[in-house]
Amino acid sequence: MLFATGNHDYGYQQGQFVKHVTQRPMNYFQKINNLFFFSVYIQHRLENDAFEFLSQNSFKAVSAEHVFISVHFPPYATGKYGANKTLSLKMENFIDSHPQLKIRAVFSGHNHNFAAFRRNNLMYFINGVGGGSLHPVYDQSEMGGRVWKTESLHGPQEVIVGDDASYGYQYHLDSWLKYTRTEVEFQSDKIVYSVRDLDADSILTTYEQQFN
């Protein structure tokens, strides 16, 4: 299991319990055949450490066919806590400044719902439904008043001026207030991401990502 340390993990003795159980630091990487995974702890004041770790170790992932980044706090989010624009810009800067890396997707949690975004053919997923009760997603028409009641959103959403929580809404694909699992299938010229509704045991949607 390749996990990403979250705020609850760090909040208990600064992650010492998680480090002891998993025998991994908060920031680490793992190479499995032609796949390369970065997992970093990004939350408030420690995000600079995470991006420094990514930059310092990026050269190790150059030869990988597929690179994935796993974080707890999402760069873009339709969930209860919204996006963190500072984090979003730092993630965009890291990805844009490392075109030699074949980064395919960023996986995150924190918000207790499912959401998918696509920016420059790179997928961003929120798979935060394992953390407890579900959080309704933002209804963008109610977003300014912080009324959370929407069960699903589809397509690009309005970026509300002055509300950084809506940063990246133009990249939005889908959000669901459902217990889901994101399944990844590698094909010769593309990756297929399937979103499974765990209650119904059926596929809600799929996203195809072409690559060279």
Image: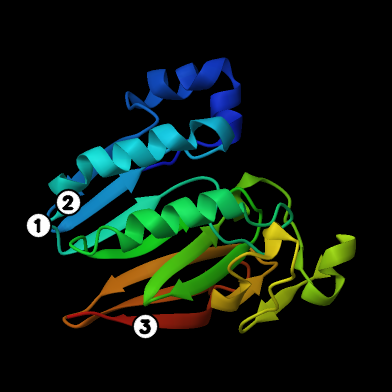
User: Which residue is denoted by mark 1 in the rendering?
Assistant: 63
The residue at the point 64 percent across, 82 percent down is 154
Q: Is residue 167 left or right of residue 91?
A: right
Front-most of 178 and 84?
84
User: Which residue is denoted by mark 3 in the rendering?
Assistant: 208
Determine crowd level at label 1: few under 14, some 14-19, many 20+ residues with C-alpha closer than 10 A.
Answer: some
Rendered location of residue 177, percent (x, y): 70, 67
For residue 49, the mark is none
The amino acid on which the numbered mark 3 sits, given as a three-letter code, is Glu
Determine crowd level at label 2: few under 14, some 14-19, many 20+ residues with C-alpha closer than 10 A.
Answer: many
For marks 3 and 1, give the one nearer the viewer.
1
User: Which residue is denoted by mark 2 in the rendering?
Assistant: 61
Front-most of 9 and 159?
159
Instruction: Give the structural element (helix, strand or loop) at label 3.
Output: strand
The amino acid on which the numbered mark 2 sits, given as a three-letter code, is Ala
The residue at the point 45 percent across, 47 percent down is 71
Rendered location of residue 114, percent (x, y): 60, 64
Instruction: Give the structural element (helix, strand or loop) at label 1.
Output: loop
Mark sitting earlier along the chain (3/2): 2
